[in-house]
Amino acid sequence: MAWRLVLRRHTPICRPAPFVRLAPIARALPAALAGALALAHPLSAAPRDKVYTIANYPVEATAKDAVAAKEKAHADGQQAAFGALLKRLVPVTAYAQVDRLKSMQAGNFVDGVAIRSESNSRTEYIASLDFSFQADAVRNLLKREGVPFIEEQSPKLVLIPVMTQSDPSGGVRFRPGGDTWTKSWKVLDLENTLTPMRIEALLPSIQDDTINAALAGDDRAERVLTNEYKADFVMFAIAEIDESNKQLNVTLAGIDAAGLVSWRRGYHIDGGDAGYAMELAAVVTQGVLEGRWKVAKTEDGGGAGGIIQMAVAYSTLEEWDDMRRQILEIPGIDDVRIGTVSPNSADVSVRYPGGGTSLAAVLARQGLTLSGSGQAWSLRSGY
């Protein structure tokens, strides 16, 4: 195929994320690619074609000399970026079909490569690259193989990185995200993702009670946030460093185009490197947001998954807090909406692929019983 390499000047980004593992490919790029780089202007793409670019992708390789290292980094990088593109487009319920496609020769689908930053030694090459793939070629591949995919971007989201800090009284306060947590988001591909976003700082006008309301699933917080940030969809990405357990806890709270969300996940801080844990957390969390959008769009097209209305019964508010945590931590759970909460019951609706029957099986493994059918389900502790 004909190759074109687009060179652009960009501000260097932070070090390549070490958690990216580049998959080997059967053959390297043509040697001519490393020797003579042709300057070209990127072609204008249709709006839906935007998601076929994987930007800010870190690559690195070591070889016998600098030229060989560069060839290897570009070749391995394009193959890994192709796999990332497929995971971006395909719903998680069809990921098993992606495994047999991501090993296909990526070079047959690449449209161009842009260098954002690069450095090298005699034997090592490190760079951040933008890989643009041929939208029609990838579409045709997925259609031919019968793999479902989503290429429509969601409306833009405002994401606010926030850090927690201990209060002298023993409580928790919130503060702006700081350089490390904020940069972990800003180096991601925020424009070409299925869920484009802009990163904004925590405004002084946003008080702790607004953040706590968002964490509780209270949609009244959104009226404050959408007004202050002049956006339809606003979400907090709250990072809490648990030094005693060497863990970074990240919580999403707010609303995106798929609905209200309150989602939490922990990441081990290895060797005291909280920055690395934050980089990983930002990548995973962006994937969660993309997954929510894909579920919403799949349902729009008649796919699997649905809204489950639950009446949650409990004996104490402490038991409710524990049940609520278990619900929110279930992988694949989406659009959690908490309605009326009383001392012994709560009205909750969630979206889960496969509906109530599938969710009941997952909850049973956690000691919770979900029973019912259609739009009437009840949840309680025990069997």
Image (cartoon, helix red, strand yellow):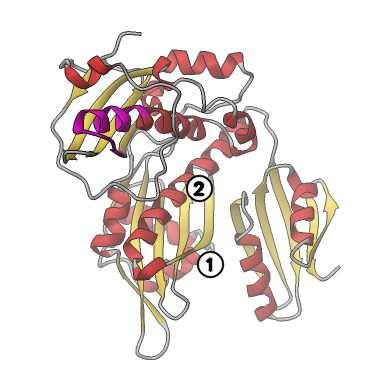
Using the image, tell me which numbered label, if any, was put on residue 319. none
Q: Is residue 88 magenta?
A: no
Percent position (x, y) of residue 285? 45, 51
Q: Quadrant of residue 305?
A: top right
The three-letter code of the residue at mark 2 reads Val
Rendered position, 302 above or below 354: above
Q: Which residue is mark 1?
A: 216
The answer to whether any part of residue 193 appears in the image is yes
The three-letter code of the residue at mark 1 reads Ala
Residue in the picture at 16% in, 38% down: 122
Rendered position, 318 above or below 354: below
- Taking 170 as reference, is 31 left or right? left
Between discs 1 and 2, the one toward the N terminus = 1
- Helix, strand or loop at mark 1: loop
Rendered position, 243 above or below 262: below
Q: Which residue is mark 2?
A: 288
- Taking 8 as reference, is 308 left or right? right
Q: Quadrant of residue 131?
A: top left
- Few, some or many residues within 10 Å of mark 2 (<14, 14–19, 20+): some
Residue in the picture at 31% in, 34% down: 55
The answer to whether any part of residue 338 appears in the image is no
Percent position (x, y) of residue 41? 18, 16
| Residue nearest the viewer, comparing 157 with 177 | 177
Magenta part of the chain:
58-75
**Quadrant (top left, top right, bottom left, bottom right) of the C terminus:** bottom right
